[in-house]
Amino acid sequence: MVLVIDYRNGKGEVLLAGDGPARRFGSSGRRDGFKALDAALIEVGDGCLDGVAAVLPTTERQQEVGMTWSSVRGAVALVNALAFARDVPAVRIDPADNDEILVEAAVVAVSLAEPQAIVRADYNGQPNITRPKDRG
């Protein structure tokens, strides 16, 4: 079974791929994302989790979907922490247009990954950590 954390649209939806069709746990934002993750983890329970896959927007689309540097770091940290906690690999897969392609890519990537594989963050643009973000 593979847990897919889908940030293509900046919402943090969760897909659970395993026996039978993949199940999507929807989200409309950050707080709902944690509820979706909780529902997926309850379904996994103590069952076998083979890996965790991150689906992040391309660096070109990060701003378009509203992902800041902090949200990219948070998404990557979440995926890596889940993988570490379950002692499974974390992988990054390319965005796709439908869930079937995502699930297939996730299963293949996890099966080919090193046991302690982690996801690294790719950011759009240069960091701007010396000036506060305009909140107005």
Image (cartoon, rainbow, N blue to C red):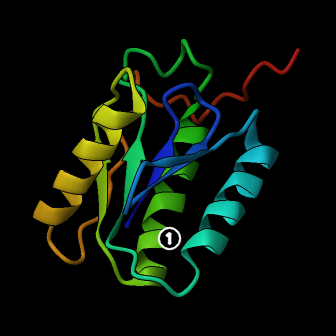
Residue 71 falls left or right of residue 110: right
Residue 84 falls left or right of residue 42: left
Quadrant of the drawing holding the C terminus: top right
Q: Nearer the viewer, residue 37 or 118?
A: 37
Task: From this view, report whether residue 130 is shown above or below residue 116.
Answer: above
Residue 34: which quarter of the image?
bottom right
Residue 125 falls left or right of residue 16: left
Residue most extreme to the left: 112
Identify the residue shown where x is 58% and y is 81%.
45
Q: Which residue is mark 1?
A: 82
Identify the residue shown where x is 50% and y is 70%.
82
Residue 87: which quarter of the image?
bottom left
Mark 1, residues whose alpha carbon is within 10 Å: few (<14), some, or many (≥20)? Answer: some
Q: Tell me residue 42's x, y (percent).
A: 66, 73
Q: Tell me residue 1's x, y (percent).
A: 37, 67
Q: Tell me residue 26's x, y (percent).
A: 68, 40
Q: Tell me residue 47's x, y (percent).
A: 47, 83
Residue 96: which quarter of the image?
top left
Task: From this view, report whether residue 134 is shown above or below residue 8.
Answer: above
Amino acid at the residue labelled 1: Leu
Identify the residue shown where x is 10% and y is 62%.
112
Q: Secondary structure at mark 1?
A: helix
Residue most extreme to the right: 136
Task: From this view, report whether residue 24 is shown above or below residue 68.
Answer: below
